[in-house]
Image (cartoon, coloured by chain):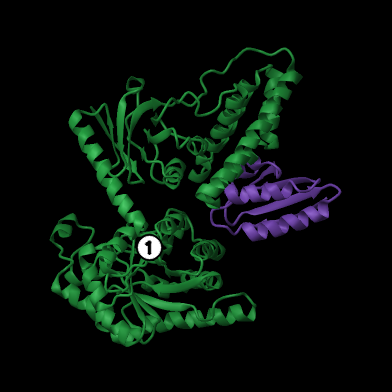
Chain colours: A purple, B green
């Protein structure tokens, strides 16, 4: 299992467009991908759970990947997060 | 005759019979199913079909209205295939032995409640997206295509329309639509405007069944809807349509033609825009450039500062969209009538004469520098002119230029592309700037005259005050004298001078502008062709 944390910089937080981009990225991997923020957990391969976390600017999110391609998943998602949020 | 008044984004008139549209969610069967697994399979088949529909809708929308407005359909597709959503529907079928339609409706309701209970208004509004995708799924399940049941050429009346419903409107059948709810910034209104369907939104009154099939006229110029109009209204509206046809045909004729007078004197016609969304209208109306892109839209109607990247993307979109034509972007012009809460500016007794525009920017480099950096990065993607508002001194230009030089050096060190020759200009809109325009012209690459403020400050007449609006004379000799002085100063220094305020679209002034040698006027996209046509007649 691999994980990393990131503080959201985007002023609107996780709104529909970046959420869509993140979910599409997470879906590329076989690993289970979870996101934790605001004291709640969600499956990152689903846009509804991700959006209802209510992630805003300045909040810390922790992403965990578990599975055979967990290293690649974390790498891809780190890039995707820093670029879009 | 019933007259409804709402808001319209498109100047066009439509006549047809009114057809009332209801969201189809009233015919869901509550009966139980025997074979649960077969029902789940039925749900999955519908899911695949609804997913394909959304994919097609996204592609269609991308081509017609552009990627930004189309993105909503991509997010909707992900909602539809969301494992939590799908899992919940399966769960309802399994435990309650619900039919798929009822399970979808119950699932939608639970997610809608979660969104509706969230703090932020943006997230609350997403409840409508969950509703929209669920409705699409239910429509597939009950095998009814959206938009069917509409006969002939009609005017659609509805409480409101979702993005997918708007996108699915058949332009050959639906001449216009009228909704009880909605505003000009709602998805339905924006999509309708881009699709070229006249729409009057937010009429307030419910469009009741009694109006079904009634002869209806939608006047998109005024945002008025006439249901069952009297003879006189019909005649007036038909005349208006005929007049409009003649006008439009004459305007279309000047598309692709240069803005020159009969004697061959040129006065270019640019467009003013407020967001990348307006670009499509500037292009459609054949604007020769963007004379004023107001960057405020990035700052207004939100709770916090836009990031540099967000700004960069917006500027880049407009610059690359204009394919090498000039794009003048005005740096932040906030203050006076445009207030933003998160700037936390103290209240002023006279905001029009207070800390606004360039004054805020120079007082707050933490806001100004990211904007300049975003602009410089975007300069690599087109022909950019950076324009500073509300200038009154040479000093303000020099301070800005020192920021720009600092950022350029930094970008060069980091090998981030930018255009080293990016133009810097000012908006001449204070009497002070007009009077020292000869000195200012030596400091910059272009002038653009902001007539709205120039008139307000010269005449000492508040432009927000309706009583002053009636008194103000924009052709006052003082104004004309200042305008000519500014143009002359620019040309003596060998730089361009444009006019981007409301006086740019004052057709009775065009002759003067041409005589003085004004290089461009910049007007609202929908008026570009009107101005060009007039110039060609001179």
Quadrant of the rendered image containing residue B425: bottom left
Q: Would residue B164 be found to the left or right of residue B199 on screen? A: right
Q: Nearer the viewer, residue B511 or B21?
A: B511
Q: Residue drawn at (56%, 64%), measured in percent from left and top?
A: B309
Q: Nearer the viewer, residue B482 or B304?
A: B482
Q: Residue furthest right?
A: A68
Quadrant of the rendered image containing residue B297: bottom left
User: Which quarter shows the C terminus of chain B?
Assistant: bottom left
Number of residue marks = 1
- Residue B213, image x, y percentages: 35, 22
Does dot 1 land on a helix, a strand or a loop?
A: strand
- Specify few, some or many for label 1: CA neighbours under 10 Å numbering under 14, 14-19, or 20 or more: many
- Residue B151, image x, y percentages: 43, 25
Q: Is residue A60 at all visible to an observer of this figure?
A: yes
> Looking at the image, is B23 positioned above or below residue B14?
above
- Residue B364, image x, y percentages: 44, 72
Q: Which residue is mark 1?
A: B271
- Residue B109, image x, y percentages: 57, 28
> Looking at the image, is B384 positioned above or below residue B99?
below
User: Which quarter shows the N terminus of chain B?
Assistant: top left
Q: Residue drawn at (42%, 57%), measured in percent from left and top?
A: B300
Q: Is residue B349 at all visible to an observer of this figure?
A: no
Q: Would residue B130 be found to the left or right of residue B81 on screen? A: left
- Could you tell me which chain the residue with mark 1 belongs to? B
> Looking at the image, is B41 positioned above or below residue B492?
above
Q: Would residue B407 be found to the left or right of residue B468 on screen? A: right
Q: Residue drawn at (54%, 34%), measured in percent from left and top?
A: B132
Q: Would residue A37 be found to the left or right of residue B475 on screen? A: right
């Amino acid at each position: 299992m691999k994980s990393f944390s990131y503080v959201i910089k985007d002023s609107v937080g996780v709104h529909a467009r970046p959420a869509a981009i993140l979910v599409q990225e997470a879906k590329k991997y076989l690993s289970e991908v979870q996101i934790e923020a605001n004291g709640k957990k969600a499956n990152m391969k689903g846009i509804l759970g991700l959006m209802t976390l209510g992630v805003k600017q300045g909040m810390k999110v922790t992403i965990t990947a578990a599975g055979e391609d967990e290293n690649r998943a974390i790498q891809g998602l780190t890039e995707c997060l820093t670029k879009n949020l | 005759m019933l007259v409804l008044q709402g808001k319209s984004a498109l100047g066009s008139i439509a006549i047809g019979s009114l057809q009332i549209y209801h969201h189809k969610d009233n015919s869901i069967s509550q009966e139980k199913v025997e074979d649960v697994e077969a029902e789940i399979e039925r749900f999955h088949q519908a899911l695949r079909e609804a997913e394909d529909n959304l994919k097609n809708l996204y592609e269609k929308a991308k081509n017609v209205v552009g990627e930004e407005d189309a993105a909503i359909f991509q997010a909707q597709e992900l909602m539809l295939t969301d494992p939590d959503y799908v899992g919940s529907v399966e769960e309802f079928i399994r435990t309650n032995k619900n039919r798929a339609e009822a399970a979808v409706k119950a699932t939608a309701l639970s997610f809608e409640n979660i969104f509706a209970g969230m703090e932020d208004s943006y997230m609350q509004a997403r409840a409508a997206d969950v509703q929209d995708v669920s409705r699409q799924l239910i429509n597939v399940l009950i095998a009814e295509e959206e938009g069917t049941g509409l006969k002939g050429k009609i005017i659609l009346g509805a409480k409101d329309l979702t993005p997918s419903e708007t996108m699915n409107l058949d332009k050959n059948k639906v001449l216009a639509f009228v909704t009880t709810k909605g505003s000009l910034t709602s998805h339905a209104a924006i999509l309708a405007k881009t699709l070229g369907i006249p729409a009057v939104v937010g009429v307030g009154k419910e469009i009741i069944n009694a109006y079904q099939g009634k002869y209806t006229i939608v006047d998109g110029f005024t945002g008025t809807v006439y249901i069952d109009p009297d003879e006189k209204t019909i005649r007036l509206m038909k005349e208006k349509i005929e007049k409009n046809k003649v006008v439009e045909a004459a305007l279309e004729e000047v598309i692709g033609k240069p803005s020159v007078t009969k004697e061959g004197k040129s006065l270019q016609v640019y467009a003013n825009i407020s967001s990348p969304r307006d670009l499509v209208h500037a292009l459609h109306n054949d604007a020769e450039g963007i004379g004023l892109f107001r960057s405020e839209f990035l700052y207004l109607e939100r709770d916090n500062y836009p990031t540099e990247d967000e700004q960069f993307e917006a500027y880049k979109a407009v610059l690359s969209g204009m394919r090498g034509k000039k794009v003048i972007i005005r740096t932040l012009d906030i203050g006076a009538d445009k207030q933003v809460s998160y700037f936390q500016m103290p209240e002023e007794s006279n905001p029009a004469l207070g800390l606004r525009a360039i004054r805020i920017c120079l007082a707050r480099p933490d806001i100004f520098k990211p904007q300049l950096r975003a602009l410089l990065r975007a300069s690599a993607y087109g022909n950019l002119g950076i324009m500073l508002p509300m200038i009154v001194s040479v000093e303000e230009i020099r301070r800005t230029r020192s920021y720009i030089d600092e950022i350029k050096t930094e970008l060069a060190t980091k090998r981030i592309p930018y255009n080293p020759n990016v133009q810097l200009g000012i908006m001449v809109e204070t009497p002070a700037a007009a009077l020292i325009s000869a000195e200012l012209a030596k400091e910059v690459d272009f002038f653009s005259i902001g007539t709205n403020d120039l008139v307000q400050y010269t005449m000492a007449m508040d432009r927000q005050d309706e009583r002053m609006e009636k008194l103000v004379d924009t052709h006052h000799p003082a104004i004309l004298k200042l305008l000519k002085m500014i143009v002359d100063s620019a040309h003596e220094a060998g730089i361009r001078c444009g006019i981007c305020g409301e006086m740019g679209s004052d057709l009775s002034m065009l002759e003067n502008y041409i005589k003085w040698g004004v290089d461009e006027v910049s007007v609202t996209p929908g008026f570009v062709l009107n101005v060009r046509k007039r110039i060609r007649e001179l």
